[in-house]
Structures are given as C-alpha cells and as structure tokens.
Amino acid sequence: MAQLSDDCFAFGGPMMSVDEAVGLIATRVTPVVDVETVTLARADGRILAHDILAPLPLPPFTNSAVDGYAVSSRDLPQQQEQAFPVIGRVQAGSSVSAPLKPGQAMRIFTGAPMPEGADTVFMQEDVRVEGDKVVLPAGLKPGANVRPAGEDIPAGFAALTAGQRLRPQDVALAAAFGLTQLDVVRRIRVAVFSTGNELASPGEARAAAQLFDSNRYMLMAMLARLGCEVSDLGILRDDRAALARALQDVAGTHDLILTTGGVSTGEEDHVKASVESVGRLVLWRMAIKPGRPVAMGIIGGTPFIGLPGNPVASFVTFVHVVRPTILALSGAMPEKLLPMPVRAAFTYKKKIARREYVRVSLRKAADGALEAVKFPREGAGLLSSLIDTDGLVELGEQMALVEPGQTVGFLSYASLM
Ligand code: AMP
Ligand code: MG
C-alpha cells in the first residue's frame, strides 16, 4: 500500500487555498506502482502504466480514400478530359500484383492498397465510364484522395503515454496497433465510512431522529467513476474509540481511507481525535465554499481524508481533495479542471480570498450564448441543488461580485468525474 511520511500533509498557513491543497497532494502522495494487464475490452478508464510506441505506421499501407480510379500523377489530364483504359480492379482487403503502366487506370475502392505505379485517385462521381475506358477530367491535384502509410501515426511515435487515463479512442488506437492487452496501474483501493449517530443505512430501520446515509453512496459512485476499488464499510457511530479501531483496521489493506462527517470542531465531531490517536492528522481549513474543514492525515502509512458531512460540501471537497489524491496515487497525469466560459444570469456576492462554487443550470439565451442560472437556494445540505443543476460555476479567490452578463467559468458535473 502507499506509504507516506508522517508530516507530509502539514501546512503552515492559516487558510489553505484550493491550489495549495492540490499542489501539496500532487507532490506528497506516493503513487502505487503495482501494474496489471487487462484485455482491451476492460481497458477503458484505466491508467496506462507504460508508454506505447507505435509498432507499425497507421495506416499500415498507402490506400485509397474513396471509391474511384487510380492513376499515376504523371498522367493527370492537364487541359482537357482524357480516356484511360481500365486494366484491373482492386477492392479493400485485396491487392494487385501487376503494376500500373503509364497511361493506364485501375478501378479502386475505399481502403484498398494503391497499386504500384499509382499515386492519385479520381472519385467515381467525377468520371465517366465508356466501355472498358474511364474518362478523367483535367485539374486534379497529384496525390489526391490517397492516404499515405503513416499519415495518421508514423511507426515508433509515442502514441500513448504512461499515466494517461484510457478513453475509448485510446483503446481503439491500441487495437489499431494489433495489441490485445495493456499494462495498467492496479485499481486504487479505497475504504469508505460514513460517521454519525444520526445516520441509518438504506434498507435498515430509521429512527425518528435519523436520516438515511446518502453521502457514502455518492462518494462510492464518484470513486467508481475514477476507477477505484471501493470497500463499503458502512456507518461509524460518534464514538472515538470505535472510530479509531475501525480506521486502524483498514489502514494496511487500502491505499486511501475516506470518511464523511464529524470533522468539524463540535464536541460530537470525533474523527479528528480518533485519527490522532492512531495516526497523525492535520485539519485543513480550506478557503473554499461550500466546504468546511477537510481533515487529511496518515494512519499506519495510509493516507486518510475526512470530508465534511453536508452533502454539497462533501461533493465539492471530494472534487478538490479526493480526486487529485486518487490521481496522484494512480500515478495519473494531473487532469486539469478547465472551466468553460458562460454568461452569468445571476447576481452573487462573495468573500474575497475564498474560492466559491455556485450550483447552476445552463440554458441557451436568445442570442445563442450559454447562460448559467443559479440554483435559488444555497444550503450545503440540499441534495436537490445538485440534482436540479448541470454543474458548478467557479468563482476565483479575487472575485467579490458577479453580475448578470459577466463571463464566468462553468464546470459540468460530468467533467468533474
Ligand atoms: P457533520 O459534518 O458530521 O457535522 O454533519 C453535517 C451535516 O451533514 C449534518 O446535518 C449531518 O446530518 C449531515 N450528514 C453527515 N453525514 C451524512 C451522510 N453520510 N449522508 C447525509 N447527510 C450527512
Ligand atoms: Mg456528525
């Protein structure tokens, strides 16, 4: 499992910016080095372990881009159309042995290899067939409608890079190289707990003063989207000793321990003290809203993250603390969140020196521009605010006021996971 030195998350300042937190995580978390081999059918979403150099050029051979007639560019009609004898036919998947002689044309189909002596193809829509001849118009450029070997990717090119998260198109590239399997970083193992006496698991009886635990399912779903192997460890009660035991139990067998709730500084917030009793903990006061303090620490060499209990705070801090930690643990290239410019259709005042995230829906304005409409309420406990919106508008530390018409940065929920 990932090993961390005891003081690796220590931070001196009074308030940590989101960028400082992400930077600390990226530099202090040691990646897991275990590699496993998966078939292409199972490779999507995994982190590639080694660079892949193109073992062959793509396309592997020069071929026709259209259905038509292949000729030599030396023979191209210059001023007026000209008839060529059609001496053969080559379709995709076959090849012809006889080379094309000067003045001859060959019937060819999309994807068929170019016959020797030919380097240009007339589209069938542009020609006229007369008996066993084809009449070709003047004015075609040499090399037209041909896909040269290697025009897509030359042999030896570093086509896929270690640390990249494989997408369907990357899997396609591996297949185009003839590969059947890929070496990927093994899945990051995450232990997930909820904490709080007020929580009941769905499926259990719920006492009058209890609510069903929703965060654990949200966090597990987010972790699954990041490719993690998740251990669902249920709900821990607000009991320091029991918490400490449970956390210690999973430290050796997981790469990350994640909890939600109990990280504030109330008397019934026991996560901080329980982590301190079995490991080391720093409470990060992150300059982010929504999101109260986030706890980070180490238990028996395993990183620990304690997220706040309010669902929206938990969601937003997951994106900025857990996600970069998972990426760092899997040796993945940092995946930058790039907010898209949209037009604000709301007024919003914020505190300077704090990054804030506003839940918004997008709509198309009369002039075609995308407009962000703010969810009418702001509570960090409102699940409906995450359900009825499309994403978050990111307001930088230096901003104090957003006014209608202003350009702001939008992060879709899909882009965050
Ligand atoms: P805490 O951070 O423990 O003080 O919790 C803050 C608020 O979030 C409280 O109203 C909790 O009831 C609520 N909360 C804590 N954990 C969860 C959870 N797993 N699912 C839903 N709500 C929660
Ligand atoms: Mg609590």
Image (tube, rainbow, N blue to C red):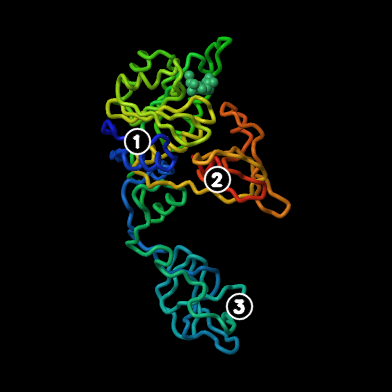
Name the foreground residue: 86 vs 302. Answer: 302
> How many angstroms separate mark 2 from mark 1 (CA)?
25 Å
CB atoms of marks 2 and 1 within 8 Å: no
Q: Against 377, is 100 above or below?
A: below
Question: Residue 295 placed where, x, y %?
Answer: 40, 28
Q: Mark 1 points at which residue?
A: 12
First of labels 2, 1 by sequence position: 1
Front position in the image: 236 or 188: 236
Per the rendering, the mark at residue 127 is 3
In the displayed image of the protein, which residue is found farthest to the right? Answer: 366
Give the residue drawn at x 35%, y 29%.
282
Name the amino acid, label 2. Met
Q: Is mark 1 on a helix, strand or loop?
A: loop
Q: Are marks 3 and 2 in contact (CB under 8 Å)?
A: no
Q: How many marks?
A: 3
Res 387 quadrant in image? top right
**Secondary structure of the residue carrying numbered label 2:** loop
On whether ligand 1 comes within 8 Å of the CB at mark 2, the answer is: no
Q: Where is residue 169 in the image (x, y as percent from the top left)?
A: 46, 51
Q: Badge 2, how many Cα within 10 Å: few under 14, some, many 20+?
A: some
Is 5 situated above or below 154? above
Q: Please, what secondary structure does the residue beneath circle 3 have?
A: loop
Q: Can residue 213 be seen in this view?
A: no
- Asked whether 239 or 257 is in front, the reply is 239
Residue 46: percent from left, percent from top: 40, 42
Q: Nearer the viewer, mark 3 or mark 1?
A: 1
Mark number displayed over residue 399: 2
Q: In this view, does 209 lie to the left or right of 376?
A: left
Q: What residue type is labelled 1?
A: Gly
Residue drawn at the location 30% of the way across and 24% of the way down? 279
Res 272 → quadrant: top left
